[in-house]
Amino acid sequence: MNSTEEINQLKETIAKYEQIINETSVPIIPSIIDNTILLPIVGYTDQDRLERIRTKVLSYSGKHREIEYAIFDFSGIRLEDEDGSVVLTSELRLMQAELQLMGIRPMMVGFTPPFVRELTNAGIASEIESYANFKAALQVLMFEQGLTFTKV
């Protein structure tokens, strides 16, 4: 195999892995509550990944116009660099604005103390609807919609 073929093969491999990364950047899980999606965000996060997540959620929401609620869980997130919380704050602001313009109520759960401090310092803490965890956010939605669990 000559060097040009090898380079082309490596480019194809990189493109394949980039596609896998984009597809797995955040799983979008339909909830037991109609028109609600759950989005656990886990692992290292930098600006590129947050932008991919935002793009994926917007694309999904555009294809599934019935979505009314999006619950994001940040409890498993780790930042790639020291400026990560500033980047997270900026991306959250953009994501929240974009989803609201699409008629979707974004709900955030699982913030750690450093993120809470950064959101407060950035002046957007009061703009974000947040809960301790998925369960708490889902309970609020169930209450608002008059839903209850019954044992079978």
Image (cartoon, rainbow, N blue to C red):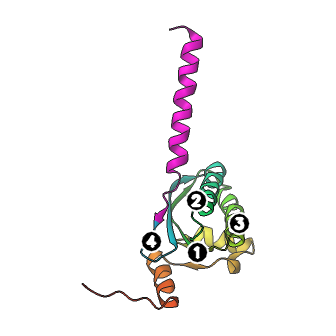
Q: Which residues are the magenta region?
A: 1-29
Distance from the alpha carbon under mark 4 to that under mark 1: 11 Å
- Of the two numbered discs 2 and 3 in the rendering, the one whose residue sits closer to the viewer: 2
Mark earlier in primary sequence (3, 4): 4
Which disc, if any, is residue 98?
3
Q: Judging from the image, what secondary structure is the residue with disc 1 in? A: loop
Mark earlier in primary sequence (2, 4): 4
Mark earlier in primary sequence (1, 3): 1
Residue position for label 4: 31
Distance from the alpha carbon under mark 2 to that under mark 4: 15 Å
Residue position for label 1: 68
Q: Judging from the image, what secondary structure is the residue with disc 4 in? A: loop
Q: In this picture, is 95 found above or below 44?
A: below
Residue type highlighted by circle 3? Glu
Q: Judging from the image, what secondary structure is the residue with disc 2 in? A: helix
Which disc, if any, is residue 60?
2
Mark earlier in primary sequence (4, 1): 4
Q: Mark 2 Cα within 10 Å, few/some/many (few <14, many 20+)?
A: few
Q: Is residue 85 magenta?
A: no
